[in-house]
Image (cartoon, rainbow, N blue to C red):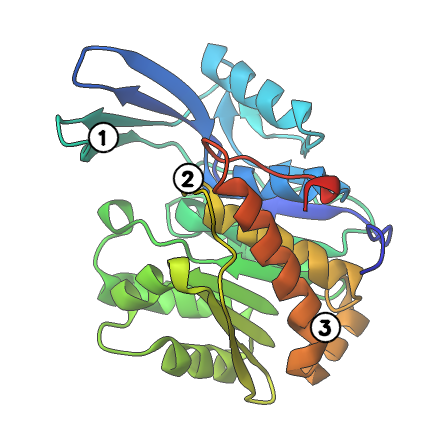
């Protein structure tokens, strides 16, 4: 596959927060998290010029979040730090069995996203796409980006935050219709479309306008569908698993990276090439995504591999 694309900046829009974990023995640990943040770090580590539109406070946690993504080579876009609200948190309390109960303190008053000149691709997903009032700014940014850039989307459903699937489905499909690439997990499919198969959901999303739809199947690999209606499944490359934290985000970064390098994402011409692509055309990007997520699960936490590591 070619070297990293130099066609222009890649922008990720979404949440950056702090996970606060309370263990049964009374210990507390804090970790920087957020699915879109993980994707941004993954793309940067794979050599792409990555910019991140988010919202964190100017408090100590916000500064830690900023330092975390900047250390990974990601540039925060203007307006991503605000004095008006504290940094969002997700407090997880673990019981003796390891099960977690969550309490969220989320702030998503996202200002208008200032897309860098020459932006060629925009990615979004997760809580940021359904949480008011910032969800409207996410949509506005995608609409502004589309004439010159491709779009990818990962619903990354969070049932305890997003509400009932019947209430969320229309919003998800609105964003699918604005996207060229849509990737989700089998769990997302089960929650959003009870009783439907991944194949049926991918067909539905292609009909809405997505050129390539992808559903990850955990340890069973991945299935994907092109705009022409072709489908394929690939086995996972999972061994020596430490944990699966961040695996889906690593997969997302890997497939976006692969498609950018293949010229199947990265502007209106790439959009048309992706729409005309056959299974074998996109397979190298699927291969990269399986490789990146395969590295991630062999490390503790949401590890983002470099090209050399895959």
| Label 2 with label 1: CB-CB less than 8 Å | no
Q: Secondary structure at mark 3?
A: helix
Q: Going by the image, does 180 lie left or right of 172?
A: right
In the rendered image, which residue does mark 2 sit on?
Answer: 245
Whole-angstrom CA distance, mark 2 to mark 1, is: 19 Å
Instruction: Classify 129 as above or below 54.
Output: below
Q: Nearest the camera: 237 or 288?
A: 237
Q: Residue at x 68, y 83 (%)?
A: 278
Q: Earlier in the sequence, mark 1 or mark 3?
A: 1
Q: Which mark is residue 103?
A: 1
Q: Nearer the viewer, mark 2 or mark 3?
A: 2
Whether residue 190 sits left or right of residue 114 in the image: it is left
Front disc: 2 or 1 = 2
Residue nearest the viewer, comparing 157 with 59: 157
Residue, x 55% and y 53% (percent of image)?
251
**Quadrant placement of the N terminus:** bottom right
Residue 176 x, y percent position in the rendering: 49, 69
Residue 148 position by quadrant:
bottom right
For residue 16, side relative to residue 142 (left or right): left
Please name the residue that numbered disc 3 is placed on: 271
Residue 251 shows in the view: yes
Query: Residue at position x 14%, y 32% from top?
Result: 97
Q: Tell me how far mark 2 sits from mark 3, CA to CA.
A: 31 Å
Q: Residue 220, how many percent across, how many down? A: 40, 64
Around disc 3, counting alpha carbons within 10 Å, would you say few (fewer than 14), some (14 to 19), or many (20 or more)?
A: many
**Residue 14 seen:** no
Q: Which structural element holds mark 2?
A: loop
């Amino acid at each position: 596959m070619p070297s990293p694309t130099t066609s222009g900046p890649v922008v990720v829009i979404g949440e950056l927060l702090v996970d606060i974990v309370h263990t049964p023995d009374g210990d507390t640990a804090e970790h920087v998290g957020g699915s879109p943040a993980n994707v941004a770090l993954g793309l940067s580590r794979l050599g792409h010029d990555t910019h991140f539109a988010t919202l964190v406070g100017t408090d100590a946690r916000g500064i830690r979040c900023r330092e975390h993504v900047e250390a990974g080579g990601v540039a925060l876009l203007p307006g991503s730090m605000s004095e008006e609200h504290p940094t969002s948190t997700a407090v997880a309390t673990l019981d003796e069995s390891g099960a977690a109960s969550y309490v969220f303190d989320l702030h998503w008053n996202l200002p208008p996203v200032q897309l860098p000149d020459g932006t060629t691709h925009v990615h979004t997903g997760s809580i940021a796409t359904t949480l008011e009032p910032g969800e409207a700014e996410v949509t506005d940014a995608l609409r502004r980006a589309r004439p010159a850039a491709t779009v990818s989307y990962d619903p990354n459903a969070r049932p305890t935050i997003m509400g009932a699937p019947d209430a969320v489905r229309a919003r998800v499909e609105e964003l699918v219709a604005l996207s060229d690439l849509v990737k989700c997990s089998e769990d997302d499919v089960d929650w959003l479309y009870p009783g439907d198969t991944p194949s049926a959901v991918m067909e539905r999303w292609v009909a809405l306008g997505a050129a390539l739809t992808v559903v990850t199947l955990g340890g069973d690999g991945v299935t994907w569908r092109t705009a022409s209606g072709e489908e394929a499944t690939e086995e996972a490359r999972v061994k020596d698993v430490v944990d699966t934290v961040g695996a889906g985000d690593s997969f997302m970064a890997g497939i976006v990276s692969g498609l950018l390098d293949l010229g199947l994402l990265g502007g209106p011409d790439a959009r048309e090439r992706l729409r005309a692509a056959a299974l074998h055309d996109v397979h190298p990007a699927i291969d990269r995504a399986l490789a990146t997520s395969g590295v991630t699960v062999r490390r503790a936490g949401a590890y983002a591999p470099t090209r050399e590591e895959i």
